[in-house]
Amino acid sequence: MSLGLNIEIAKPLASEVFDIGETITIKWRTAGNIGNVTISYSTDGVTYTQIVASTANDGSYDWDTTGLTASDQYRIRIQSFTVIGNSFKFELQDKSIYNLEPSESGISLVAGGLYCIKFRSTQSITNYKIELFKNSTSSYTTLEANIKSPQYLWNIPANQTIASDYKIKITEVGGSTSVESANFFAIEAQPSITVDNTVDAETGAVISEYVEKYQAKSIAWTTVGTIPNVDILLIRNNVVIETIASNLTNTSPYSWTPDESLDLGKYIIRVLAYEVPSSFRIGKHHRIYGDKPIILGVAKTLTADLATKANLSGADFTGDLTTEQDLKINAPVGESASFYMEADGGGDDGELWWIYVKGNNDIFNIANNKAGTQGIQLQIQPDASNRAQSVVMISGILQIEGEQGSTPSAPTNGKGGYLYTKADGKPYWISADVGETDLTATGGGGGGSAYWTPQWSQRYYTRYDNWFSPSTTYGASYYNWNKDNGDGVLVNWLDTYNPIIVVPKDCTLNKYALQGRPTSSQTYEFKLLKASPNWGTNGNHSLTQVGSTQSGAKTASVYEKLEETGLSVSLSAGDILIPMLRRTTTNTSSYYFWYSVFTLEATFG
């Protein structure tokens, strides 16, 4: 009699799924006095195969399923004499890894980009090894030796070999189950666009190209990687002025005629990827483009080509009217001509100027296109290499440095005057009311000292806790002061670098200051370095610090300054000065800026 006796199977549950080779814990409950039990399984509900002939009636038994066949009709029976308990049907499946991506044909990934490798597996596989297979070399490279997630964000190295015979392999860690991509996929080069530009042979800097209004201009570029379509934009001061072409088939070159409504001046032509591969849409690589700096002008008032050399100081004078853009004018005596000029030697704020050649005595007149601007008269002469040495802006006076052969006549209209140097190397000023004045003289009329008070406007970079200086290519006149010199103490200035600020003559430095608006509230440090080059001799230049490091916590979007006053530091003609700025808080890759002005005050004599 089995009255009051019962066996109830608790696991496996109905429709539960297990991998073959997995150990299944069979659980049951009994009622009444039942001794040892026999456990069996069936795949048809009729024929049963014994798992264990006799085991203690303790409610649990671990069953090793290795070697069984796959079926969704498995049942468990537990029996003690005439007392029988049967389970619901459950499934044993082959262990596998499946649905691997990438597997489809025609997939192309990008070196330097990202790709999410995805797959699925049966439940008993919990740890995976991911490998990259290359067919031509029959080699496997481990991407991850042991991960638990069935997806992996692969940061494809930028130097990954470009080829089309790659596969991904996923293997069970500690087991033999694996899967490979069904098809090969390709890895392409990083997409890039390079616009055809003219580069200065000495500095490597891109030279702005003169583009004449009303004339067709051919825009050419080259592409690496897959970029099906491009946009071509005209940009000025970081603002898109005109969309030259949109969603254009990526075929170079493209012919563009500047619209007559455009102002003369400095622009950028940008060829921009309309789309990039999805595996490359990340961070700074999201938009791929190449730039071409241009200067838009007209030549209708010129008697000769705008690109010719000037002849303002006698035979074969080849001085540049502006060192920044290297434009030259050829206008005969008594005629006027127009051109675009960066009067301050840098930035995007150049304007249209007119030049008027007055006579054969080297003097010419420059006037701005702004209404009411008074013309400035100058006398220039090339140096021994037959080039004007530099163009600078001093208190609103455009000065072309270089030794002068004679004293110019004072202005006849009684307005303004001329700033120039003579054979003695001294600076002079002449005007109708004062006459010629030696600016270094300390005697006569009470004497006094002459001051050197230059200033430079810039966007000053900071990043990590590294020291930043002006550009080692373009110097202090370039609006981005963005040279990252690392976080250590800089001890040498390379002779391949721009000298930044050159002291014009012996003087005493009284103070220096960085004044402006930081974009982030941080603690900043600022210092001034000095070197004394042996001009004309190869070799790097040892740096020393002028004064002490200035430090302070500064507030974003508020006018702040870092300055050192009360100095009495002797500087010699030809010394170079290098300002340095860094932040000492928020040591991250984010850029924060000072929109600022750097000033010096030094005394001559």
Image: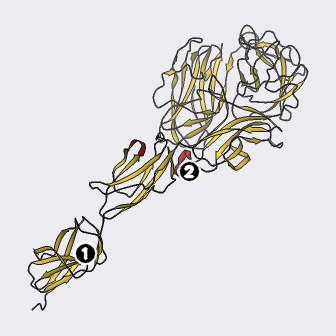
Label 1 Cα neighbours within 10 Å, binned few <14 / some 14-19 / many ≥20: many
Q: Quadrant of the C terminus?
A: top right
Looking at the picture, how far across and down is residue 569, in whole percent?
Answer: 56, 18
What residue is rendered at 22% in x and 69% in y?
24
Q: Is the C-beta separation of discs 2 and 1 under 8 Å?
A: no
In the picture, the quarter occupied by the N terminus is bottom left
| Colour setup of the view | secondary structure
Label 2 Cα neighbours within 10 Å, binned few <14 / some 14-19 / many ≥20:
some
Q: Quadrant of residue 330?
A: top right
Q: Amino acid at mark 1?
A: Pro
473 to the left or right of 343: left
Label at residue 277: 2
Name the residue rendered at 70%, 35% in the picture: 293
504 left or right, relative to 84: right
User: Which residue does the image show at 57% across and 44% down from the upper left?
Assistant: 225
Q: Is residue 389 above or below residue 44?
A: above
> Three-letter amino acid code at disc 2?
Pro
Q: What residue does disc 1 label?
A: 12
Q: Nearer the viewer, residue 358 or 435?
A: 358
Image quadrant of residue 340?
top right
* 290, 339: nearer the viewer: 290
Disc 2 element:
loop
SS for tag 1?
loop
Q: Position of residue 149 (x, y in %)?
A: 37, 57
Q: In the rendered structure, which disc, 2 or 1, sits on the residue that comes first in sequence?
A: 1
The reply, left or right, for residue 313 in relation to residue 110 is right
| Image height of 515 relative to 150, above or below | above
Q: Is residue 211 left or right of residue 415?
A: left
